[in-house]
Image (tube, rainbow, N blue to C red):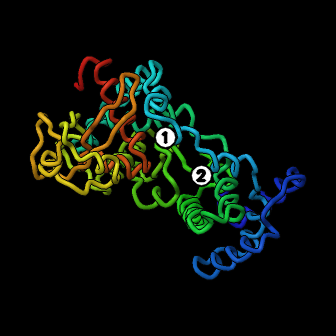
């Protein structure tokens, strides 16, 4: 089933089988969305109305988005979710199988292989868990039944329907996370349309089954969000007795410089320059509190997921994968 005149006939068969589930066909917001898509993007009204009826409201999606458990955990527990033997060895295997594409991505974008591998490992266990919800159900449920973020998810639903039409993909076929994230790197539809790339030059942008496109797309996302090739990600610091602790965890965005942090009592012996943008954050480890200086590239990782714990998990997983491989080469 593709975005063609045959879509409506195909949906009729699905609707009959799923009549007991609640679709969005009668939802006022969904109807307004149909009006907008017809006027703004020239979608076929009858087909789109049928698709909204097929788009199911899922309570499990609403429950999941209200309790993203991993974000509430302290670092010492959060770390154990992602820095595991299985993910480390899975990363080694993924790297070995995709070494050529990873090398090509580093040469083109300046993003080191371990971070691309770690992103894919954290997001989907190297493609082993890309999500079990239909993207159509996830986005429509959150667009029309979750008022707090309705505007954001309505825009993502718009982008989803545009990308499936552009790529000639059946909009009922793709699966992803409860939030509608897709593929190896869990791109939202807007991210797909802005940052996903045809890295192997086959004429398609496939982040679902093509690891080359997935690798290139993650690297491109990093560069478009400010990645600086050759610069470090984060360095450890030991606060001085008179350190200004009020600036710890003050912002994800680096609002200071390495030199300013040193003046405030957070020195580092690592190879960084005093002019580098930076902030300072703490981690609750099994051995007590640790303090780190987050640099520009650390901030770039948080653009993928707005969490310093997430960024640290990606960084540490990448370092562990390097160790397990015996180096980067």
Question: Whole-percent x and y of residue 44?
Answer: 69, 74
Structural distance between the alpha carbons of marks 1 and 2: 13 Å
Q: Position of residue 60 (x, y in %)?
A: 73, 46
- Residue lying at 85% horizontally and 53% vertically, measured from the top left: 21
Q: Quadrant of the N terminus?
A: bottom right
Mark 2 Cα-neighbour bin, 10 Å: few <14, some 14–19, many ≥20: many
- Dot 1: element: loop
Task: For mark 2, give the secondary structure.
Answer: loop
Q: Is residue 194 left or right of residue 13?
A: left
* Residue occupying the point 28% across, 20% down: 323
Which residue is most to the bottom? 39
Instruction: Tell me the quarter of the picture where residue 23 sits.
Output: bottom right
Q: Are marks 1 and 2 in contact (CB under 8 Å)?
A: no
Q: Which image quarter holds the C terminus? A: top left
Q: Residue at x 19, y 41 (%)?
A: 242
From what the image shows, is residue 131 above or below residue 31?
A: above
Would you call the spot at circle 1 few (<14 residues within 10 Å), some (14-19), or many (20 or more)? many
Vertical placement of 64 versus 34: above or below? Answer: above
Q: Is residue 20 left or right of residue 244?
A: right
Q: Which residue is mark 1?
A: 184
Q: On screen, 274 above or below 92?
A: below
Q: Nearer the viewer, mark 1 or mark 2?
A: 2
Instruction: Using the image, determine if residue 274 lies above or below residue 130.
Output: below
| x, y percent for residue 260 | 14, 52
Q: Which residue is mark 2?
A: 180
């Amino acid at each position: 089933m593709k975005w063609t005149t045959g879509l409506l006939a195909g949906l009729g068969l699905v609707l009959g089988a799923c009549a007991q589930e609640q679709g969005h066909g009668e939802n006022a917001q969904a109807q307004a969305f149909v009006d907008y898509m017809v006027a703004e993007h020239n979608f076929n009204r009858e087909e789109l109305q049928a698709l909204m009826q097929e788009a199911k409201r899922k309570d499990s999606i609403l429950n999941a988005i209200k309790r993203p458990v991993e974000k509430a955990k302290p670092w010492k527990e959060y770390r154990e979710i992602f820095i595991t033997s299985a993910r480390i060895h899975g990363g080694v295997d993924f790297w070995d199988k995709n070494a050529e594409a990873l090398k090509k991505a580093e040469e083109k974008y300046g993003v080191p292989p371990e971070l691309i591998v770690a992103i894919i490992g954290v997001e989907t266990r190297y493609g082993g868990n890309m999500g079990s919800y239909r993207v159509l159900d996830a986005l429509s449920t959150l667009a029309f039944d979750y008022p707090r973020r309705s505007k954001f998810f309505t825009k993502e639903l718009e982008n989803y329907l545009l990308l499936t039409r552009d790529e000639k993909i059946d909009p009922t076929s793709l699966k992803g996370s409860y939030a509608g994230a897709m593929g190896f790197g869990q791109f939202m539809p807007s991210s797909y349309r802005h940052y996903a790339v045809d890295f192997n030059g086959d004429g398609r942008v496939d982040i679902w089954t093509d690891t080359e496109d997935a690798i290139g797309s993650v690297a491109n996302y990093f560069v478009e969000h400010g990645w600086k090739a050759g610069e470090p990600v984060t360095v450890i610091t030991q606060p001085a007795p008179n350190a200004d602790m009020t600036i710890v965890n003050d912002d994800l965005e680096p609002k200071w410089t390495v030199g300013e942090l040193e003046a405030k009592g957070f020195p580092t012996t690592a190879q960084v320059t005093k002019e580098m943008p930076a902030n300072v954050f703490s981690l609750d480890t099994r051995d007590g509190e640790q303090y780190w200086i987050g640099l520009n590239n650390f901030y770039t990782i948080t653009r993928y997921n707005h969490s310093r714990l997430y960024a640290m998990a990606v960084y540490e997983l990448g370092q562990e994968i390097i160790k397990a491989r015996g180096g980067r080469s």
